[in-house]
Image: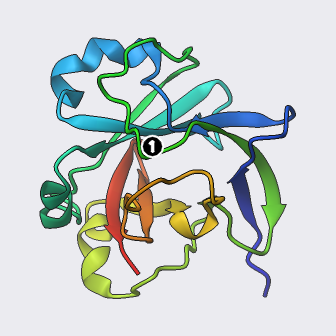
Amino acid sequence: MLNIKLIANIDGLSQNNVIGRIGGNIPECLLLYNDEVKDFYFYVTFEHPERKGVFLSVFTPKNYEEMVDNNIYPNCSIKVFSHGFSNESDNCNYTNEGVGKIKIVGYKESENDGFITVSDNLDFIQDEVFFYENLISDGYAPFIKIDEDYYPDEVISGSYIFGYGALYLYKHTSTNEIIAGFWQMS
């Protein structure tokens, strides 16, 4: 049986079907959350695959050790915000200089994964139950995988954010809240 997924990829050349961007400055509307993100880097923003006009923005801790020590729900240190469309701000306090600003294009159906893969049957780097058992028992289901294997060469200068790994976002089955469930390195 085929597992058809929705995917989006990083594409600096395309002008069509742009759904977000990786890198750059924090979205303007999220400047109101200064206290919540003061120790974080902005990572990516992209349109919610099921809710037109709603965007998901992801932030990673500036302290990598904190990120490593808190990589699994309920203590995953990655922050995810849902919000309406917002222009990029001029505020570079949350900008990770190691991540180039490039457009994300999507969504399209595919049997294969992409930089952003939307599916209720995600492929894990490490398929160990301890990564997701608490999420499932608390009513969350797999939703989105953000996979560093799909970075074009020009995106990252220096270390990969997730150790050449992936971030897994989960959606609550009754509230539809999107959270960072866990991240894995390869």
In the rendered structure, the answer to whether residue 27 lies left or right of residue 129 reads right
Give the position of the C terminus as an image quadrant. bottom left
Please tell me which residue is depicted at 76% across the width and 34% down the height of the picture. 18
Q: Relative to 110, is 52 above or below?
A: above
Give whichever of 110, 92 is nearer the camera: 92
Callout 1 amino acid: Asn
Q: Relative to 43, is 93 above or below?
A: above
Label total for image: 1
In the rendered structure, the answer to whether residue 172 lies left or right of residue 86 reads left
Judge whether residue 72 can be spotted in this image: yes
Task: Quadrant for residue 110, please give it.
Answer: bottom right
In the rendered structure, the answer to whether residue 186 lies left or right of residue 137 reads right
Query: Residue 157, how many percent across, how many down?
Result: 47, 53
Query: Residue 22, how many percent across, how many down?
Result: 55, 41
Q: Relative to 76, is 91 above or below?
A: above
* Other residues around mark 1 within 10 Å, as few (<14) / some (14–19) / many (≥20): few
Task: Quadrant for residue 131, please give it.
Answer: bottom left
In the rendered structure, the answer to whether residue 172 lies left or right of residue 69 reads right
The residue furthest front is 158
Please tell me which residue is depicted at 57% across the width and 51% down the height of the picture. 155
Please tell me which residue is depicted at 37% across the width and 21% down the height of the picture. 92
Give the position of the N terminus as an image quadrant. bottom right
Please tell me which residue is depicted at 36% across the width and 75% down the height of the picture. 185
Query: Residue 104, how many percent across, how many down?
Result: 68, 42
**Which residue carries the number 1 mark?**
176
- As helix, strand or loop, the secondary structure at mark 1 comes to loop
